[in-house]
Image (cartoon, rainbow, N blue to C red):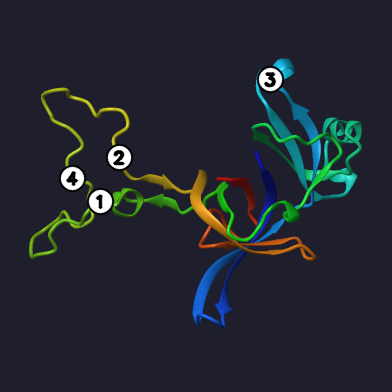
Amino acid sequence: MKGILGKKLGMSQVFDPDSGTMTPVTVIEAGPCPVVQVKTADADGYDAIQLAFGAVAERKLSKPEVGHLKKAGVAPHRHLVELRGESGLSVGETVTVESFEPGERIKVSGVSVGKGFQGTIKRHGFTMGPVSHGSHNIRKPGSIGASAYPSRVFKGMKMAGRMGGARVTQPGLVVHEVDVERNLLLVRGSVPGPKSGLVEIRIA
């Protein structure tokens, strides 16, 4: 298992003068992420590592968080995220973008942009009703169940409601470029989440 935490900075384009192609990329400021805790199947029931990201002042953390980080010899960090799988890392080591290479296939997880309360057309991709004269069913969801039987609406029915703001994992992404000096990963395509949002980059 290979992974790192980062902050989504936004999207850009990279021009290749040889082929003349323009590649859309997402710029992610990834790491450095110190290893705070290593979990093993024997002691904890599963293999995982806990990474820290985003250095902050000690006063911005609770005492248990500060103590947990000090035990590992790590300075105060805002985010603590656990990545499952065997890594071969030990407490105190630091994960950087150097562990990734251009052309490597990855998957990125983050919390999607919240879009508030949306209707069924935007939220679930329902088709619109007829827009001819007299129609009152242009953006309505249509039938949500029969009347006499079962005389109720089934659970899980696709209806209007809050959209976005949920954890999303985008697979099938590729590392386009690695900037070790500035701790930047350029990922081909778009990744979940808003600008400055926390993302998890893991090997596909």
CB atoms of marks 1 and 4 within 8 Å? yes
Q: Which residue is mark 2?
A: 158
Q: Earlier in the sequence, mark 2 or mark 4?
A: 4
State which quadrant residue 135 falls in: bottom left
Q: Earlier in the sequence, mark 4 or mark 3?
A: 3
CB atoms of marks 2 and 3 within 8 Å? no
Helix, strand or loop under label 2: loop
Q: CA distance from mark 2 to mark 3?
A: 39 Å
- Relative image position of residue 73 (x, y in whole percent): 91, 37
Up the image or down, 171 lies above or below 87; here it is below
CB atoms of marks 1 and 3 within 8 Å? no
Q: Please tell me how crowded label 1 is: few (under 14), some (14-19), or many (20+) other residues with Cα within 10 Å.
A: some
Q: CA distance from mark 2 to mark 1?
A: 9 Å
CB atoms of marks 2 and 4 within 8 Å? no
* Residue 142: mark: 4
Q: Nearer the viewer, mark 1 or mark 4?
A: 1
- Amino acid carrying label 2: it is Lys
